[in-house]
Image (tube, helix red, strand yellow):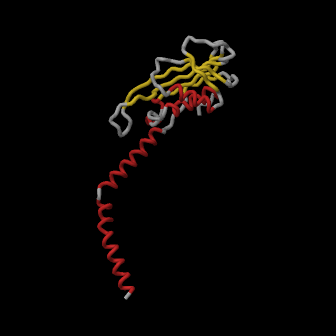
Amino acid sequence: MRAVAFIARLAFGVGAMLPLAGCSLLSPMPGIELAKATAGMATVAIGQGPTRATQTVFHDAALPERVCIEYNRSLALPEFVPALIAELREHEVQARVFEAGVRPGDEACPAWVHYQGLQQWDKPPLSDQVRPYLSQATLSLHDAGGRLMAASSYRSDDATLGLGKWATTRNKLAPVVRALLTGFEG
């Protein structure tokens, strides 16, 4: 008798939950959520696409412990200088920023980093909003006397299938800073 009652309750419970399972399987919401998750993963993959340094010139100089960055007002990308400083710190190089034309003594700035960049606007994948992105950047490292020690560049056109176009500014600058300080583009 207990077995029959247990089976009856089990059948009732399964029968009561069956319509709920059908709703979740037949509802368009799981499909929509799956599509959104897939789109999100694709956007992350595109954003983290490969970036690399190009046109590197390196004169076998000692790695500076500190550099001064000459601020370039013509590049209106607010995350550029913080990304540059963060990447220099990854290589244990301290950095300070100065306005163009301000020249502290050689003790304060044994080396200088000059930069140029090009900001462009476009729509990221799966978005209808236009956003700015860094499409080109060139960094040059000079000694206190102004002699070129190293230079390296980034171009989003060089990225495989444009996959690095939506990478963060820091991800774009990382291989360029590494090439600037070590001479290796890879």
Considering the image in quadrants, where does the N terminus appear? bottom left
Using residue 6 as the reference point, say whether residue 66 is left or right of it.
right
Relative to 161, 25 lies left or right: left
Q: What is the x, y in percent for residue 59?
A: 66, 21
The C terminus appears in which quarter of the rendering? top right
Q: Locate residue 90: give its quadrant.
A: top right
| Residue 16 horizontal side relative to residue 70, left or right | left
Please indicate whether residue 79 sits to the left or right of residue 65 in the image.
left
Instruction: Pick whichever, 154 or 122, lies toward us.
Output: 122
Q: Total marks drawn?
A: 0
Residue 103 appears at what percent x and percent y?
61, 12
Task: Classify residue 20 by image quadrant.
Answer: bottom left
User: Where 99 falls versus 13 (above or below)?
Assistant: above
State the residue at coordinates (51%, 18%): 72
Q: Position of residue 148 (x, y in %)?
A: 62, 17
Viewer-side residue, 170 vs 55 = 170
Residue 116 x, y percent position in the rendering: 51, 20
Residue in the image at 41% along x and 26% along y: 120
Residue at 69%, 16% (x, y): give it. 107
Q: Is residue 96 above or below residue 25?
A: above
Q: Nearer the viewer, residue 3 or 44?
A: 3
Q: Is residue 155 above or below residue 111?
A: below
The residue positioned farthest toward the bottom in the image shown: 1
